[in-house]
Image (spheres, rainbow, N blue to C red):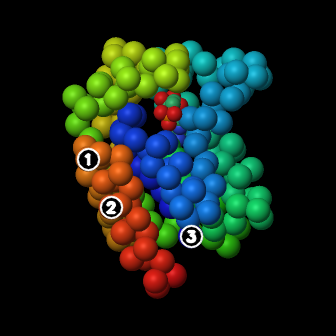
């Protein structure tokens, strides 16, 4: 089973992905983490993208698509991937379908975490003291939220049409969200 977890920055995608990884024996593919690794390791790609990431904009579709293909093509992860932070644009959503098809896979469910900007601001200021991410301050958080608002609707429409989209109330507590997500995954597991 392959899962897409979708939602604004600070919605809890990473936290919920980690929960799903543990409970359903899957692997988390976070494009944000992969990109941050490039920056940390001082690679050519890392140097190219650091200012884009720190401004709250998206890096190019081509860059992230190249990164995810390495993961999708790996037999060890076949049909056990949680896409965390990918796709973020309609081009990426279409590309993901093409790539999965190339490796005889598909998406089984898209979980969308719904969260307000107020909650996001609060969560990002809490996360900043723990994770120390360069793009976690209120100004950039707002910019990242606006970037999300601009690019997310076509992606959501795309998944609405395929009937894969399930909306989860991301304002609830972590354990309530865990329960809601488990219910949704369990309900589709029966017919997979
Ligand atoms: P995240 O950790 O998912 O919040 O991502 C942090 C930053 O990485 C984003 O603000 C973007 O600059 C970049 N990024 C992560 N995933 C993508 C993606 N799928 N497409 C474009 N940029 C991305």
Residue bearing mark 2: 180
Residue 72 in percent (x, y) is at 69, 57
Residue at point 36%, 20% (across, down):
125
Residue at point 39%, 34% (across, down):
9
Do we see residue 92 in this rendering? no
Label 2 residue SS: helix
Which quarter of the figure has residue 120?
A: top left
Q: Which badge, 2 or 1, is on the more N-terminal residue?
A: 1
Q: Nearer the viewer, mark 1 or mark 3?
A: 1
Q: Does the residue at mark 2 contact the one at mark 1 (Cβ under 8 Å)?
A: yes
Residue at point 51%, 81% (across, down):
192
- Which of 76/101 is in front? 76
Label 2, label 3: how far apart the Cα atoms are: 17 Å
Q: Which badge, 1 or 3, is on the more N-terminal residue?
A: 3
Which image quarter holds the N terminus? Answer: bottom right
Q: Which badge, 2 or 3, is on the more N-terminal residue?
A: 3
Do we see residue 64 in this rendering? yes
How dense is the environment of label 3, judged by Cα within 10 Å: few (below 14), some, or many (20 and up)? some
Residue behind label 3 places its C-beta within 8 angstroms of ligand 1: no
Residue bearing mark 1: 172
Disc number at residue 1?
Answer: 3
How dense is the environment of label 2, judged by Cα within 10 Å: few (below 14), some, or many (20 and up)? some
Q: Is residue 65 left or right of residue 129?
A: right
Q: Is residue 30 left or right of residue 43?
A: left
Furthest-front residue in view?
175
Label 1 residue SS: loop
How dense is the environment of label 1, judged by Cα within 10 Å: few (below 14), some, or many (20 and up)? few
Which quarter of the figure has residue 59?
A: top right
Label 2, label 1: how far apart the Cα atoms are: 10 Å
């Amino acid at each position: 089973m392959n899962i897409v977890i979708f939602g604004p920055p600070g919605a809890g995608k990473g936290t919920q992905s980690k929960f799903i990884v543990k409970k359903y024996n899957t692997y988390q593919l976070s494009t944000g983490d992969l990109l941050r690794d490039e920056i940390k390791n001082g690679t050519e790609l890392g140097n190219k993208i650091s200012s884009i990431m720190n401004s709250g904009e998206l890096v190019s579709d081509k860059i992230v698509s190249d990164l995810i293909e390495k993961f999708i093509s790996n037999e060890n992860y076949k049909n056990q991937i949680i896409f965390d932070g990918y796709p973020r644009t309609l081009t990426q959503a279409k590309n993901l379908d093409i790539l999965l098809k190339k490796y005889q896979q598909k998406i089984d469910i898209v979980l969308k975490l719904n969260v307000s900007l107020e909650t996001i601001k609060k969560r990002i200021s809490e996360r900043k003291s723990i994770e120390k991410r360069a793009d976690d301050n209120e100004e950039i958080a707002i910019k990242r939220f606006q970037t999300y608002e601009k690019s997310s609707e076509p992606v959501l429409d795309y998944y609405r049409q395929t009937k894969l989209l399930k909306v989860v109330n991301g304002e609830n507590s972590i354990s309530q969200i865990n329960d809601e997500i488990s219910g949704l995954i369990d309900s589709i597991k029966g017919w997979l």
